[in-house]
Image (tube, helix red, strand yellow):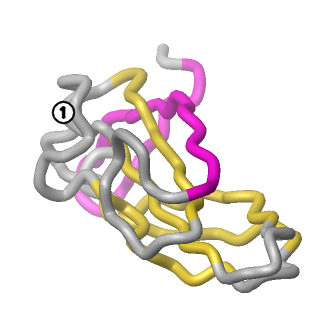
Amino acid sequence: MQGQTGTITINRVNTSGANAYLNAWMDFNNDGILTDAGEQIITNVLIPSGTNGSANYTFNIPSNAVLGSIGVRVRITNVNTTISYGDSGSGEAEDHIATILPYLSIGNLVWYDVNNN
């Protein structure tokens, strides 16, 4: 939700025999570019060789994030890098879609409109 803390669950697998690094970006302004300020939500998290399991990562969603579907890129590589595009060592990049919902409140009550009605 806009202006709130979000959580992403990532299944991390590293069978390379060497350390790897996890990075992720969300296109909060939905302009198709993942290099804008504040769009990197995970930066160079060490994933040791032998890691196999999921982990949760929290991040801040800007209050002016575009509502609706936005792009998400998750990248694991063998180099400590923060670029979202192009070649960057050996590894994998995956693109996904996330949905940004509005934050609605009246007084001290907060609603989350699950079915958008």
- Percent coordinates x, y for residue 74 in the rendering: 53, 49
- State which region is magenta: 90-115
Up-down: is 29 above or below 50?
A: above
Q: Which residue is mark 1?
A: 29
Residue 44 colored in magenta in the image: no
Please state which of residues 30 and 84 is positioned toward the viewer in this rendering: 84
Q: Quadrant of the N terminus?
A: top left
- Percent coordinates x, y for residue 106 in the rendering: 25, 48
Side of 40 where 69 appears, left or right: right
The image shows a total of numbered marks equal to 1
Side of 65 where 20 appears, left or right: right
Dot 1 alpha-carbon crowd within 10 angstroms: few under 14, some 14 to 19, many 20 or more: some
Query: What residue appears at the point 50 percent right and 59 percent down from the top-left corner?
Result: 89
Residue 93 colored in magenta in the image: yes
Query: What residue appears at the point 60 percent right and 56 percent down from the top-left corner?
Result: 90
Q: Secondary structure at mark 1?
A: loop
Which corner quadrant of the image does residue 93 belong to? top right
Query: What residue appears at the point 62 percent right and 74 percent down from the top-left corner?
Result: 20
Side of 35 where 53 appears, left or right: right
Which corner quadrant of the image does residue 76 belong to? bottom right
Up-down: is 102 above or below 44?
A: above
Side of 8 where 69 appears, left or right: left
Farthest residue to the top: give it: 117
- Percent coordinates x, y for residue 62 in the rendering: 20, 52
Which amino acid type corresponds to the residue marked 1 in the rendered image?
A: Asn
- Percent coordinates x, y for residue 25 in the rendering: 38, 50
Please state which of residues 101 and 48 is positioned toward the viewer in this rendering: 48
Q: Main secondary structure of the magenta part?
A: strand
Query: What residue appears at the point 72 percent right and 81 percent down from the top-left corner?
Result: 18
